[in-house]
Image: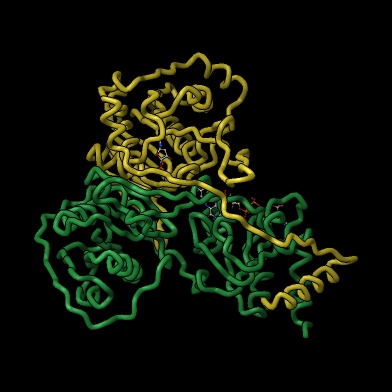
Amino acid sequence: MRQIVLLKDIPDLTEIKLDSQTRAPIIEGVKRRISEVDKRALEAAIRLKEKVGGEVVALSLGDDKTKTALLEALAMGADAVYIVNEPELKGLDTNATSKVLEAAVKHAGDYDLIIAGEMTLDSLSSQIGPRLAQLLDIPQITYVKELNVADGKVRAVRDLEDVDEVVEAALPAVVSVVREINEPRIPNLMSIMRAKRKPQTVWGAGDIGLDASEVKSQSYVQITSVSAPKVERKQIRIEGESVEEAASKLVEALMQEGVI
Amino acid sequence: MSFLVFSEDRELAFQLLGKARELADKMGSEVAALAAGSDPMEYVSQGADKVYTVSGLGGFNVEPYGAAVVEAVKAANPSTVFMGATKRGKELAPRVASSLGVGCMNDCSGVELEEGKIVVERLTYGGSTVAKETSTSTPTVISFPPRCFEKLEPVERTGEVVELELDLPEPRVKVVESREKPKSTADLESASIIVSAGRGFKAKEDLRLLEEIAEILDAQIGCTRPISADLGWMDQWVGISGKKVKPSLYVACGVSGTIQHVAGIRDSQIIVSINSDERASIHGISDYSLVGDIYEVLPALTKALRERA
Ligand SMILES: Cc1cc2nc3c(=O)[nH]c(=O)nc-3n(C[C@H](O)[C@H](O)[C@H](O)COP(=O)(O)OP(=O)(O)OC[C@H]3O[C@@H](n4cnc5c(N)ncnc54)[C@H](O)[C@@H]3O)c2cc1C
Ligand SMILES: Nc1ncnc2c1ncn2[C@@H]1O[C@H](COP(=O)(O)O)[C@@H](O)[C@H]1O
């Protein structure tokens, strides 16, 4: 079985500082890592491979920094990494991104399963999985928290609001996973060393048969501003000689506030 | 600038209709809706000028529903498609957008007209920032979660009902089993006081400590995602991927205060944190913070609340 896992490297959210004037996030220079849920998508693929065999390749539309960030995927157990890196294909919206990934998937060879994350934590768009399923015209299985493959079929448990839905579909299919599906492994030193010798292939737009400016013209959504909402909190620490005293002080404060 | 509205959740569809009607009235344009279930005229009284119906849709499945919305878009030819951002809606909206080859802004928190253009607000960067986004495609698909907007008071209006004749695709994903989740009656979005549990709780029984306080304060009980999604102790959680709440008082107990959680409580009037780790980030975004063990603080708090006034 051959699985393609979609990985995006995003700025480490815990390291993003705000511009003191505009409250816009400062992304320049922040270390990039594989988005948290994407790592779990990869872990899910590796666990399936450990069960049924085959190959796991990672695919990313990224830039010059993506190669370094995706070393972690190779260390975790991906067999190969494909990166689309084309200067003109930066800052695309989800429509254009999915077109690039569609072309790259077709170029990356046969596949039985494509695994994505529920959402990336930078853009929170939750779009690429469903879009890719539509473009490739194969089954779309979202919010997966348990994943199995047997007899040419994928069987999954989907985590919806009101139900856990057990579903089945023929392969190939696109699956997107939620964070609860697993705990991703932390690669040991040996695997990290070995990762450096695994293949990383970089493609430009032309390599996957795309005309970059045509794709770019299909990127419709523009971000006009980004800033952190200003929150003013009182930040009062409640202390006391004893827990009881602190608790009483807290109750007093909340009564003063008129909220209880 | 005309609208088409769809959500598989009727209440949410009506909320979206309310907003679409308001925007359309400003611009002198039309609102259409694709109805889910029976009684299309109700969509008219909720603000639609035209209602499309499709027979044989059945329970939600993304392929036939996607096809139906795409056909409704082709029939109505709107410039903007409003969809509900339930989990099902959030996988449907991008699929519809992809079929049409257009832009989509998923899970937005607000929408405005700016110089005749639709501009939405969405959380980004894990929930720490708000982005304003706009799209140049026609149409553009935009989704909103429940309770972003209020539905209109139903009024007697005239509207047209159009039945779409469709060959719906057979779903390729078969539902083998549907396991109901335990349904709590907590209504977090409209609660005025919420006491909330995080991983600081060691066992489900210990939630008793919160239940006592909730009883005294007539509060609802919320939790973080791991308490619900990993441990299954409750059916709904608070945060970017859960409920966005706006109580007058939010008491976070044993909650670390990750950005994904905090993004859901930012509109609270007063935030209280109780966490034994003095460096926990929840303390930094609270009005009142108490560094301590919930297993000691909560019983003391219960006692103090009983004794008050
Ligand atoms: C795509 C995505 C979406 C997400 N969406 C959400 C969301 O909507 N909502 C959400 O909540 N999370 C969400 N998360 C998960 C989030 O990243 C965190 O994992 C989660 O919020 C942490 O929950 P917690 O605070 O309960 O647990 P922890 O981070 O483990 O914190 C537990 C806290 O309890 C304290 N504690 C321990 N024992 C005690 C004690 N005896 N007394 C007092 N304090 C104690 C500890 O000091 C610690 O600070 C999301 C994650 C992803 C990847
Ligand atoms: N640039 C990208 N390269 C590879 N995969 C991506 C990219 N962007 C998004 N994805 C995949 O699509 C999922 C959903 O992303 P999004 O729709 O942006 O929230 C992610 O979790 C990834 O698995």
Quadrant the N terminus of chain A occupies: top left
**Rendering quadrant holding ligand 2:** top left
Q: Tell which of B45 and A159 is nearer to you.
A: B45
Q: Colour of chain B?
A: green
Asked whether, in this view, residue A250 is left or right of residue B62, the answer is right
Q: Residue furthest right?
A: A241
Total labels drawn: 0
Horizontal side of B217 relative to B89 (left or right) equals right
Image x and y of residue B134, in percent: 37, 49
Q: In this rendered view, identify the residue nearer to me: A242 or B32.
A: B32
Which chain has been coloured yellow in this picture?
A
Task: Report which quarter residue B262 is drawn in.
Answer: bottom right
Q: Which residue is pictured at 58% across the width and 58% down the height?
A: B224
Q: Position of residue A217 (x, y in %)?
A: 28, 34
Q: Residue furthest left?
A: B165
For the point 40% across and 30% down, the residue is A90
- Residue B224 vs residue B26, the one in the foreground: B26
From the viewer's perspective, tell me whether residue B202 is left or right of residue A204.
right
The image position of residue B267, as x and y in percent, is 57, 64
Measured as percent of width and height from the top left, residue A35 is found at 50, 37
User: Quarter holding the C terminus of chain A?
Assistant: bottom right
Whether residue A228 can be seen here: yes
**Camera-nearest residue between B34 and A241:** B34
Q: Residue at 77% x, 82% y: name it.
A: B308
Q: Can see residue B33?
A: no
> Residue pushed farthest front?
B115
